[in-house]
Image (cartoon, rainbow, N blue to C red):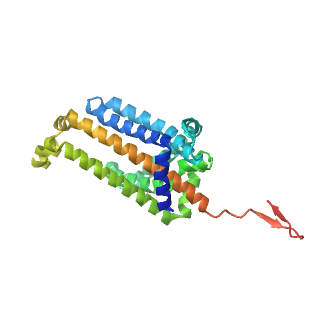
Amino acid sequence: MIRDSLREALARMADTPVLWITGLYLGALFALDLLIPAAGDTTLGARIGFLGLCALPFFLGGTYGVIRADGAGLRGYLESGARYYFTILLAAAVIVAAGFVTVLLLLVPFTLLGGTPLEFLPVAVLGVGIPFAFFTFFSDTAAVFEDRKVLDSIRRSVEFVLGRPGRALSFYLVNLAVGLLGLFFAVFLWSFIIADRIQPFMEANQTALFHNMTAPDLVNLIGVPGLEAGAAIGFAAVALGATLLLTFKACYFRRAVSAAPSAPAAGEFDEKGRWYRY
């Protein structure tokens, strides 16, 4: 199923251009978040990043709506994005809020035992974030493909993963492998382009540089052309990777739901053998 879903995703990317809108948006957001803070305006970069993430559910709803409608165009993309925007956004907000509260609850006993919260915080975040992401990853697809409401979409995602934990884990590993492969090639290409500028950095005392070099120093070392090259490479990598992985996710969810056996309807037979549904 995973292989067939990946093949379908590649085919849909080739014959449905509107699926690239979300990837291009995320690629542009990544490039802006790289260039604006490098120019010295970290506040503006943080605001753009936050607003960009708030707008992301619209693009997710558009992508999933196009795949659900089997080839809808730009109009269908926009309508689906507007229709499911608040459902996806609120579901994500509930998940993040629940994770935040869980992390705080884990920090309380650690603090009472005399520990420092900042020391335990990374472990708590990973310990909470990974399980939360594992079980709620399909809440946005459930909201679109099955018209689920906010809390119901989260419940459906948990139910979907629990019903096929092995296949869900395999799906996550394939996504991780594709993402790491794309990251490797992007970093390798960027390193090749700016190799002459970072060579002194690689030959210097790494410990001293780590403690003394600031973000502006790193920007000056790489240079404006190097940053622009990184932004261009990052834009292309994020646009391609996001388009592939989001389409892959939607195709996998739809195939898995279609292949799942439907639950028998609740009811009973009367004395004449006629079926009455509750």
The picture quadrant where one finds residue 258 is bottom right
Pick out the residue farthest to the front.
15
Expressed as whole percent of the image width and height from the top left, the position of residue 85 reads: 55, 38
Residue at horizontal 44%, vertical 46%?
243
The picture quadrant where one finds residue 270 is bottom right
Residue at horizontal 55%, vertical 57%?
158
Residue 260 horizontal side relative to residue 8, left or right: right
In this orientation, which residue lies closer to the viewer: 94 or 55?
55
Residue 147 horizontal side relative to residue 29, left or right: right
For the question of whether residue 248 can be seen, the reply is no
Expressed as whole percent of the image width and height from the top left, the position of residue 218 reads: 19, 38
The picture quadrant where one finds residue 45 is top left
Residue at horizontal 54%, vertical 46%?
64
In this orientation, which residue lies closer to the viewer: 275 or 184?
184
For the question of whether residue 14 can be seen, the reply is yes
Expressed as whole percent of the image width and height from the top left, the position of residue 171 reads: 46, 60
Residue 271 horizontal side relative to residue 231, left or right: right
Residue at horizontal 61%, vertical 62%?
260
Expressed as whole percent of the image width and height from the top left, the position of residue 178 reads: 38, 55
Count of labels shown? 0
Pick out the residue farthest to the right.
272
In this orientation, which residue lies closer to the viewer: 42 or 14?
14
